[in-house]
Image (cartoon, rainbow, N blue to C red):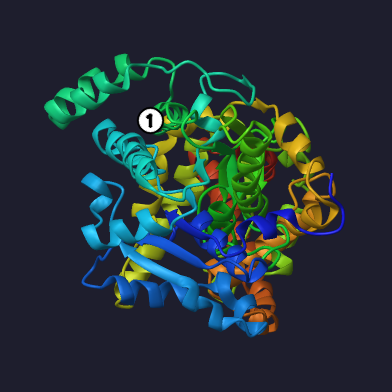
């Protein structure tokens, strides 16, 4: 093991890299890390598509405004943006939608490919996920075969690609089906016919996302003997632990999304068993693994007599190494929401975890839909666009699809990742940290809630004093509404059962206890 310099930085010096999925959560963080920590890198080619009437150059300018790059700008490294070269294209199109001139540019220059593009929608049809996740990966692999200087392909997969298992190793599992058969079905059948076959095709896979991500890994495995390949499998990717700033996020998936809803006071119940392990991994750890994997598979090639070694697979997971359960946070979660409240909150935040979907649905009617109806009505009267009922309906309709991911505990081995973390120089261990042993979950989620406030809800830390004053006002309103609600129940009990005030009052604790269950 080398201890005096960064072998990873040295490897990427004067190299040209190509990134798909560059505008996504991981892609943006990857670009930021490459530009900030590997200034010797030559060019960062990014696949980007023109959309919504905006050219590729306009989308590149938007990308540069992403909050991920604030640190880069603060440290006065903006000139490094010149290293980014946009390539117009789309993984969902034949030949990645890249024109001949740009394709030749990549063929002549690219040394490392990071394939991050994917559709993450669990509800999406098999036709679309096959085109993006499976065929998209095949198209990237086909490009890699043509690259004259290729030294590494790193494919960003998912730990949930094997979600039909609850104990998962860092190895390639047998393909769930013949990819050619799946591709043929999606190209010949319409959506309705394909939907009827979907359950039989997926078998033990919970959705089309995990199924096609699993198949995509085999596309990479097919070329592992031709050039160095690595697969990185993150679990649920969450806000940054350390870089570019603690708590940084642009993703509304997972805990970031429900903290955002809870901080606004509109999400009050969450279907989640606090006793089961939730496998979360910070985005900066994932990015470090992607970069390190590109370096490492090339090292193995050199050690193997300049021949590609075996396909390398790394889990970026916490379940078997640094497990997190919400019971560790349950007594602090609401405190954090009130320590860092929102000026834009519509109600007093109070989030409760519910262990069953049945109880959650009952609670959602009372705590989500009824308040949502009145708040949407008020919004409409004030000339705004009502969205709460639509939002809660969307969550309601997705519950059956998400149930397995909400209430299943997976155990992912990360022995290969930990071995990699120990096998790089001390400098690289510090700069491209992979080991989460020192991660403090309480501190991490406090930073996450602050990050959600700043980066997702777009509220500056300067607004905290005003937000805290509003939080106290909302508390007063919340208590008043609760008192009014139980006073109303008391009157209803007297009217319905013809009982005295005292007897009706005795029923209130029972009603409170029952309502508290949901």
Quadrant where the N terminus sits is top right
Q: Quadrant of residue 212?
A: top left
User: Does residue 427 lie above or below 411 as drawn?
Assistant: below
Q: Secondary structure at mark 1?
A: helix
x 49%, y 53%: residue? 111
Q: Does residue 501 appear in this view? A: no
Asked if residue 500 lies left or right of residue 319, the reply is: left
Residue 200: give x, y in percent of width and height.
30, 14
Quadrant where the C terminus sits is top right
Give the tally of numbered discs.
1
Q: Quadrant of residue 102?
A: bottom left
The residue carrying mark 1 is 212
Residue 61: give x, y in percent of width and height.
40, 78
x 52%, y 18%: residue? 173
Asked if residue 110 lies left or right of residue 409, the reply is: left
Residue 342: give x, y in percent of width and height.
60, 72
């Amino acid at each position: 093991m080398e201890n005096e310099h960064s072998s990873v930085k040295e490897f990427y010096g004067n190299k040209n890299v190509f990134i798909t999925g560059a505008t996504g959560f991981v892609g943006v963080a990857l670009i930021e890390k490459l530009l900030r920590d590997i200034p010797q890198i030559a060019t960062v080619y990014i696949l980007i598509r023109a959309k919504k009437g905006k050219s590729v150059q306009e989308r590149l300018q938007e990308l540069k405004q992403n909050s991920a790059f604030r640190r880069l700008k603060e440290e006065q490294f903006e000139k490094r943006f010149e290293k980014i070269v946009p390539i117009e294209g789309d993984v969902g199109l034949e030949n990645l939608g890249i024109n001949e001139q740009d394709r030749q540019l990549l063929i002549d220059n690219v040394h490392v490919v990071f394939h991050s593009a994917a559709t993450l929608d669990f509800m999406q049809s098999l036709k679309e996920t096959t085109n993006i996740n499976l065929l998209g990966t095949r198209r990237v692999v086909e490009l890699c075969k043509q690259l004259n200087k290729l030294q590494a392909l790193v494919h960003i997969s998912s730990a949930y690609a094997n979600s039909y298992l609850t104990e998962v190793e860092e190895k390639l599992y047998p393909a769930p089906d013949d990819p050619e058969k799946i591709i043929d079905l999606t190209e010949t059948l319409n959506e309705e016919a394909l939907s009827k076959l979907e359950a039989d095709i997926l078998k033990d896979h919970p959705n089309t996302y995990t199924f096609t991500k699993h198949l995509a890994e085999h596309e990479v495995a097919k070329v592992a003997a031709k050039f160095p390949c690595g697969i990185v499998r993150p679990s649920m990717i969450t806000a940054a632990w350390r870089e570019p700033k603690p708590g940084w996020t642009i993703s509304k998936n997972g805990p970031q999304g429900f903290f955002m809803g809870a901080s606004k006071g509109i999400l009050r119940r969450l279907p989640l068993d606090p006793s089961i392990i939730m496998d979360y991994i910070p985005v900066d750890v994932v990015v470090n693994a992607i970069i390190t994997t590109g370096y490492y598979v090339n090292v193995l090639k050199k050690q193997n007599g300049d021949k590609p070694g075996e396909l390398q697979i790394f889990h970026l997971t916490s379940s078997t190494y640094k497990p997190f359960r919400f019971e560790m946070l349950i007594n602090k979660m609401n405190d954090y929401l009130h320590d860092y409240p929102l000026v834009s909150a519509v109600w007093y935040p109070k989030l409760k975890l519910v262990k069953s979907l049945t109880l959650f649905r009952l609670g959602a009617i009372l705590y989500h839909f009824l308040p949502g109806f009145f708040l949407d009505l008020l919004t409409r009267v004030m000339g705004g666009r009502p969205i709460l009922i639509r939002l809660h309906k969307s969550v309601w309709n997705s519950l059956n699809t998400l149930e397995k991911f909400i209430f299943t505990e997976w155990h992912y081995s990360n022995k290969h990742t930990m071995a990699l973390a120990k096998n790089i120089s001390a400098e690289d261990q510090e700069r491209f940290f992979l080991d989460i042993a020192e991660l403090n979950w309480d501190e991490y989620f406090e930073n996450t809630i602050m990050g959600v406030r700043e980066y997702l809800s777009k509220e500056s830390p300067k607004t905290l004093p005003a937000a805290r004053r509003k939080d106290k006002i909302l508390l007063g309103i919340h208590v008043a509404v609760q008192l009014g609600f139980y006073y109303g129940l008391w009157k209803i009990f007297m009217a319905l059962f013809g009982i005295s005030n005292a007897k009706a009052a005795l029923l209130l604790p029972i009603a409170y206890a029952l309502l508290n269950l949901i």
